[in-house]
Image (spheres, helix red, strand yellow):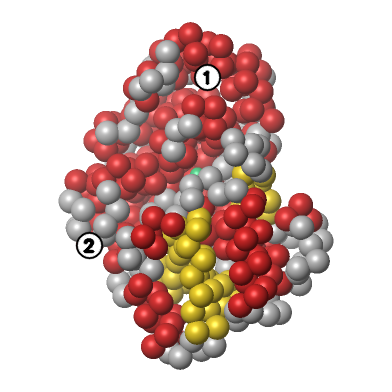
Amino acid sequence: MWFFTGPSLAYGPGAIEFLASLQSKKSMIVADRALVKGGLVAPVVEQLTKAGAEVEVFGEVDPEPLMSRVQEGAEVARRFAPDLIIGFGGGSAMDVAKAVYALYERPELTVYELTPIVDMVLGVKSRLVQIPTTSGTGSETTWATILTEGEGGRKLELAHRELVAKWAILDPLLTRSMPARLTADTGADALCHAVESMSSDWSNPFSDALAKEAVLLIFRYLPRAMKVADDPDARENMHYAATMAGLSFGNSQVTIGHALGHAFGSVFHVPHGRAVGLFLPYAIEYNFASAKPKFGNLSQVLGADSVRSPQDLSARVRSLWDEIGMVRTVPEIGGITRERFESSLPDLVRRTDESTCVTTNPRSPSKKEIEEIFRAAWDGRPVTL
Ligand SMILES: [Fe+2]
């Protein structure tokens, strides 16, 4: 027996109005620092106060959030005692909201005890609601949270099914001010989630259906969302596509593309979406033989006669990358010399090999193969392993 888990969805332009119906008396918002500075949290606060709630904003979340930030947020929650915890922002804010929610509900626990194998019994004091302001991470749907231990420290991937939000509110109006570069990076991340999910050993009929539709929408709308910032159709469809892709990989896992991207991003400090986007075509080529039936299903979606060879699919992704200005090779990232790349290879290979994302990859890569994929991404040549 298997399960498919996700939050209930409230969606549509203006969907943040739904907050008023949650009848919260005390709401805590966990938000990205940049959004608080930019005044973007104000409409959320307004919805809650209009409905009679007292509101506390914890707006201290930065990219790659530190464990210490979670502890601070949990302290605020214990003091304020909210009945609603709202993650507001990109993946970092929503990830911190999940961990704050767990530590508020179970103050006797540490984050290290958030393991999937025990019942947590969360949701006694509060409900968790997630509101994404970018269209890509899918964190609003998933049960995982990625936190960093100390400055430049190791990444902790924690997960528990009870960290899935009660509600995700998808309001595309919140994404209209996203800059073009962020739109491209986050949209690329969403495409990686969908394609990698399809190739995962844990893919299933439900994750496949959502991934397929997400791929279709992303190919159709990502270039538009990037070129015309306030194109309402493009913003709306990209926002839903990102959540579909999130539901998909949240129930099937991502694969080697994310393992390569996580390793590369943490060594060279490249934003997540750009790092995983760089490796997607190479990951498709490496996995193609093992995931051919699944990838073949994308022919209709991509308007192609067939997807018979790895290049049929990877070339489509590369041409989408060209349209949105996404990097296709390591040197295109800028600032990485050949010498630095070569000397980092052992570390890159080790990090990729140790990533939990390779567990569900349809092919089990050797260290030599991982190194070859990195070298192909430097040269910009297809992976023919
Ligand atoms: Fe991702």
Q: In the rendered view, tell whether residue 364 sits above or below residue 58.
A: above
Residue beneath disc 1: 373
Front-most of residues 58 and 228: 58
Q: Which residue is drawn at the image coordinates 48% and 47% (left, top)? A: 63
Mark 1, secondary structure of its residue? helix
Q: Residue 217, percent across and down?
A: 33, 52
User: Mark 1 to mark 2: distance in Å?
Assistant: 38 Å
Q: Which residue is drawn at the image coordinates 22% and 62% (left, top)? A: 232
Q: Is mark 1 within 8 Å of ligand 1?
A: no
Residue beneath disc 2: 232
Mark 2, secondary structure of its residue? helix
Type of amino acid under label 2: Pro
Q: Residue 129, percent across and down?
A: 53, 71
Q: Which residue is drawn at the image coordinates 42% and 85% (left, top)? A: 49
Type of amino acid under label 1: Ile
Q: Residue 175, percent across and down?
A: 31, 59
